[in-house]
Image (cartoon, grey):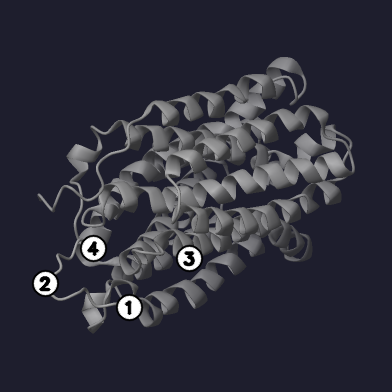
Amino acid sequence: MIADLGISRTAVSTAYLTGTLVGACAMPSIGRCVDRYGPRAVMAVVGAVFGAVLLALSFTSGIVGLTAGFAGVRMAGQGALTLVATTTVAYWFDRRRGLALGLTSAVGAAGISLAPLLIEVLIADVGWRRAWAVEGVLIWALVVPIALLGIRNRPADIGQHVDGVPPAPGAEDHTAAGWPLRQVLRSGMFWAVAACLSASSMLVTGLNFHQIALLGERGLSPVAAAANFLPQTLAALLAGFAAGALLDRVSPKAVLTAAMAVLAAAVLCVRFVEPGWTALAFGFLLGGSGGVLRSVEAAAFPRYFGTAHLGAIRGCAHTITVGASAFGPLAVAMGRDLTGSYAPAMLAFAVLPAVAAVLVLCAREPAVRKVRDQS
């Protein structure tokens, strides 16, 4: 795209930043729509919009169209679809919510990690314009039917119960309880979790965005650099599933702190990557941290704040997270421009997950499910 459109790598990174920030602004509204209309309708609409955006990107001819396309992709794809899918799972599970969300998030993280490798093959075969079009048609063919035919909003809609288990006679049903958004925003734990998600989103997006060039600078061929998404995929799958199961037994604080330590190690590892096992270590660390964070984000908010306003809460968190991801590619590109290499800036970037870990350790865990629906 850089070659065909005649624009620089920094210009593409800036377009990605602008488009992502614009797309992120829609997340709170989408979250409120999930609370009001249910995941099924929202997922169908978002899927239709996402497919149309991908098709439109196949016709882009300059930086303006590319920026608009990035806004649509970030709003509908990794933003809204992720939000709707994991919120749906949170509605249906309570006792083993961590495991269910861990499985969902692990598969999602693995798909995100694997997609660049598959799309690279598609681009080599049909070109980047047709690749955008193929992706759009696939979204229409897969996501929209799944939303309409395979999704139900909540168990009560079809006469079922959360976890498939009816509540005991006379027992109070807490599954629909929840903190209102205005009270959540006054909780230190919300902002601590958001800080971890933002650090991960920014750094993982930035490193993935420039991965071919970054690992090429360390001596890997373009094919080997693209293949590094495979260990990232495997690590994201395994770590996300393990983190989800662990979250049913331990506090999210411990898992968040461990994820930040792994992310910091991945960032610092860039300075020492060479063809061979160090490149594999980088891939496993980066993918593992992302897999863990996706599971924690999906499980921590319903655990701490309930599900009554979960869409609005997670929509607000996604705005922060997606917005942070916008700065990743530009920050990495600017670090290279200023120093002449990708590696020196990694020392500064590693500070971000360290600070986020400190915030998590200092935050007080909110009382679980003590606040009923106050809307």
User: What label does residue 170 carry, if any?
Assistant: 2
Is residue 112 rendered to the left or right of residue 25?
right
Is residue 101 rendered to the left or right of residue 329?
left
Q: Is residue 241 visible?
A: yes
Gap between marks 1 and 2, in whole Å?
A: 18 Å
Gap between marks 4 and 2, in whole Å?
A: 15 Å
Q: Residues within 10 Å of mark 3 (few under 14, many from 20)?
A: many
Would you place residue 295 above or below residue 214 in this image? below
Q: Amino acid at mark 2?
A: Gly
Q: Residue at the location (52% across, 33% down)? A: 199
Is label 4 or label 3 in front? 4
User: What label does residue 164 carry, if any?
Assistant: 1
The residue under label 3 is 51
Q: Amino acid at mark 3?
A: Gly
The residue under label 4 is 175
Q: Position of residue 113 (x, y in %)?
A: 65, 54
Gap between marks 3 and 1, in whole Å?
A: 34 Å
Q: Amino acid at mark 1?
A: Gly
Q: Position of residue 299 (x, y in %)?
A: 40, 53
